[in-house]
Image (cartoon, helix red, strand yellow):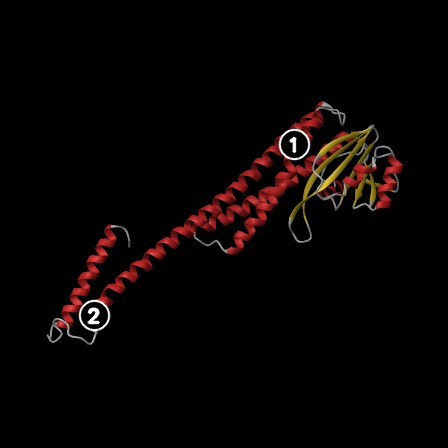
Amino acid sequence: MIKYYYKSLRTQQVQELSGYKRGTWVYVEAPTEDELEQLVDKFHLDPGILEDALDEDEMPRLEKEGDASYIFVRYAYKNAEAELVTMPLLFIFSDDLVITISLVHLPVVDQFLAGKVDFTTTQRAKLVLQILHEIVEQYDTFINGTSKQIKLIRSRLRGHEISNQDFIDFVLIEDELNEFLAALMPTNATLRRLLRGRYIPLFEEDQDIIEDLLLNNEQSIEACSSNIKSIVNIREAYSSISSNNLNRTMKILTGATVLITLPNVLFGMYGMNINLPFQHQPWAYVFVVLVSAFILIVTFMVGRAKRLF
């Protein structure tokens, strides 16, 4: 799908044009082979780089071929299964051209078309930076939501209410955060190279925007790393608590086994069909009970002194 959006400083609404004209934002979503060939022929683009844009695993990078600069980044979105994933986005920038190519719908486009972002397609460099800003903001939103989910699970740890599903959620969250890190870290290098002004012309205001993007990106990276550490710490804490509880339970059961076994030995001896001391005395039963009680008390006291019970 290829769409042409146009908005100048004089217009209030974004216009969707039927064809290309100078100052238009060419928005390409899930392009077919025919559409890619059309873009290559019409705008004299590198077909190999456009093919790279269709690779789901393509990482952020910068290339320059002729007059066109090719900027790869990755953006986060929720797929049909409500999972957080990242996808590549290609910016193509030249003297009179801005093209974005994505495999799936680019969520930030809705912000632009709804008028929530003040932009113009004729200011090409600023348009690219504004799209990058919205992508970074989207990362922040998802990371903040993940942080709240981790804090909620951590609060349940105090009451020993963590379930197996929570650990499954931890695995999914950790995968999402690692995917975010894999996308954000090379994006930082891309932004630093953009700051040099060799790939797109930058005014002083544009340089300030890139510096803010770098700062926000680094904060997102730190937040991802912090959340991953929190997940690891919670897992280790729960593992330690579970091991400690298991050890206490085993000690109690072992102590109970010892305390039950000792009097059974004495009772078993006097249950044998042989001649035993005091077996004909009327106080023999009381004697056996008292001796058993004495052995139990002594064993319990020794165990308590040695912290065995």
In the figure, 19 relative to 65: above or below? below
Q: Amino acid at mark 1?
A: Asn
Residue at 86% across, 39% down: 39
**In terms of depth relative to the viewer, which is nearer, 53 or 97?**
53
**What residue is drawn where x is 53% and y is 39%?**
226
The amino acid on which the numbered mark 2 sits, given as a three-letter code, is Met
Q: Earlier along the polypeptide chain: callout 2 or callout 1? A: 1
Is residue 236 shown left or right of residue 182?
left
Residue 121, image x, y percentages: 80, 34
Q: Locate residue 125: give its quadrant.
A: top right
At 89% from the left and 37% from the top, the residue drawn is 42
Give the mark toward the camera: 2 or 1. 2
Where residue 300 sits, quadrant-wise, is bottom left
Residue 118 visible at all: no
Extreme residue toward the front, this view? 274
Q: Which quadrant: the C terminus? A: bottom left
- Tell me if I can see residue 244 in this picture: yes
* Circle on res. 188: 1
Q: Nearer the viewer, residue 10 or 161?
A: 161
Q: Which of 209/297 is in front?
A: 297
Give the residue at mark 2: 269
